[in-house]
Amino acid sequence: MSSIHKEIQHQTANAIAELYGTTMSPADVQVQETKKEFTGDFTVVIFPVTRFSKKSPQVTADEVGKYLVNAIPAIKSYDIVQGFLNLLFNDAFWYKYLQTFGNEWEQAAEKQTIMVEYSSPNTNKPLHLGHIRNNLLGYSVAEILKARGHYVIKANLINDRGIHICKSMLAWMKFGNGETPETFGMKGDHLVGKYYVEFDKALKGEIYELETLGTYTKEEAAKHAPLMLEAQEMLQKWEAGDPETRRIWEMMNGWVYKGFEETYKSLGVDFDKFYYESQTYLLGKDIVNEGLEKGVFTKREDGSVWIDLTDEGLDEKLVLRKDGTSVYITQDMGTITNRFSEFALNRMIYVVGNEQEYHFKVLKLIFKKFGVKWWNDLFHLSYGMVELPSGKMKSREGTVVDADDLIVEMLETSEKQTKELGKIEGLSETEQKELFRKIGMAALKFYILKADPKKQMMFDPKESIDFMGFTGPFIQYTYTRIRSIFRKAETDGIAVSGNYTDTNHILGLEKELLRLLYRKDSVLYEAEVNLSPALVANYVYDLAKTYNKFYHDHKVLGEPDENTRNFRLALSDKTAHTILACTKLLGIELPEKM
């Protein structure tokens, strides 16, 4: 919260004490930015004050307004709209604000240790469009938390074992003829994904044959198909530590990890800690035993272990199968206990699709029943599906929208549109290629992150790269426009000075930019509270859009009055710094020229 917000709260509390002989905590005084359609900069919500004044909102607002004008010299005037007291600050306040504007983010009062888990791919297929949203969202949330001063651990739990991995392994053994990513000329994750699809096609053929013979129903045939039985046998061998099965598993997973690494590099995301399901899937069984002793869990006659959550509005949930093997919730119970112990976490954030909302509700309630102090520090950042105009994504049928393919498409679209608009003049071939990459990835990232994470979204590659739309490239264009002003000033020998006085009246669009800059830290705070990069994305777009209007209507370098020119250069510089800081949180790179 800014110092002026605190000052307004403090002086309003003083006004209530002096005018009405009672106390109100400054923290309870509601101060917000004045809406654009009204005159003013900051607004005090008066309705809560009327219980002390015993007067109408209009009269109360007028009395408090007169007090604040005398108490805070920077207030030029006030206006009352129903129960809202709108305070207009003088130009001297805004001149001083710009001169003291800091490029650093305001830090949280209490620093925390927070783990953000995202990506969490399976090693039987390449990353797809849904993974792109997951990775970009997780990375950006982590960067937002870091900007607020928290110690953040970016974690990736890789699902590297299970029946789905065995399906790809078995198909490779049967149909692969020993091919490798090098011999086939394909990224390792794509090659393994290819055999996942091959397994599914062959399995469907076997199911059809068994069903046609009339021996089994379709559902029964899926269980008795030879390929499925072989895959299950392979999983049992893996769990038993069979050397040959483990060798093939390690080899194929190695191909996939190398492929993932390339995709992560293209996306510009990173991790501090990798976990592997093969190393964690046995965790949690001790917790199950402890839960049985404490009466948190119950064992049924068949040996399976359950938790009853009907008192929490849910149902009964299996935590251990009758054969003693773990389910996902068992593993998560073990890993989260270890993480809180290893890192002394204050918060654990899981970035996972909304189809897993029930799972994380159960996980949280299990620890509530255990009575651990951190049960309410588990957060599920649930996000909606991503679709393309062509329809939903599917993996087993081979129609998945691969992340790599989409990235290539974005770079190709970027190159085509950038060349058509003539934005490559004077750039070398290497510089052009780098520009196409930055524009294409900015288009992808901004389009994904500007949407509310909780909502399902449609990603339109062509729309995302519009240079004059609600897009990443538009924000990049605005930044390079500002940077070009300072390059031209240097070329033309115009001195760029931060020296200006408050003698000139601040015009409308100048004031809009100043008010937007003022919002910077409150936007980051709201983004942290809501775990929403969309708030940052929409804010930086508003800032870029407003600057373009300002640039269109007012001269900067061409302004003949030196004082006004220096003020506008300072305003431009602070705008550029803020755009750069915001886009960094979104993982977007800004070119110097375009």
Image (cartoon, rainbow, N blue to C red):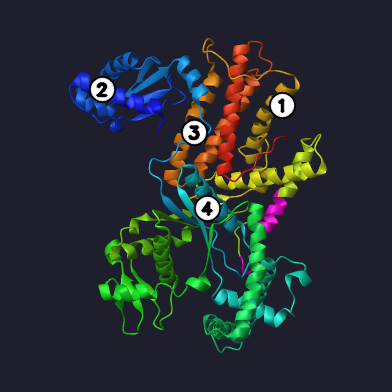
- Which region of the structure is painted magenta? 395-410
| Residue 479, above or below 286 | above
Q: Where is the N terminus found, in terms of image quarters? A: top left
Q: Position of residue 93 (x, y in %)?
A: 45, 18
Compare residues 466 and 530 and report the one nearer the observer: 530
Residue 480 visible = yes
Q: Which residue is mark 2?
A: 14
Q: Which residue is mark 3?
A: 520
Q: Disc number at residue 487?
A: 1
- The earlier-in-sequence mark between 3 and 2 is 2
Residue 397 sits inside the magenta stretch: yes
| Residue 144, above or below 264 | above
For marks 1 and 3, give the CA distance.
26 Å
Q: Mark 4 packing: few (<14 Cα in 10 Å), some, or many (20+)? A: many
Residue 295 sits inside the magenta stretch: no
Nearer the camera: disc 1 or disc 4: 1
Are the two marked residues, 2 and 1, in contact with CB atoms closer than 8 angstroms? no
SS at badge 1 = helix
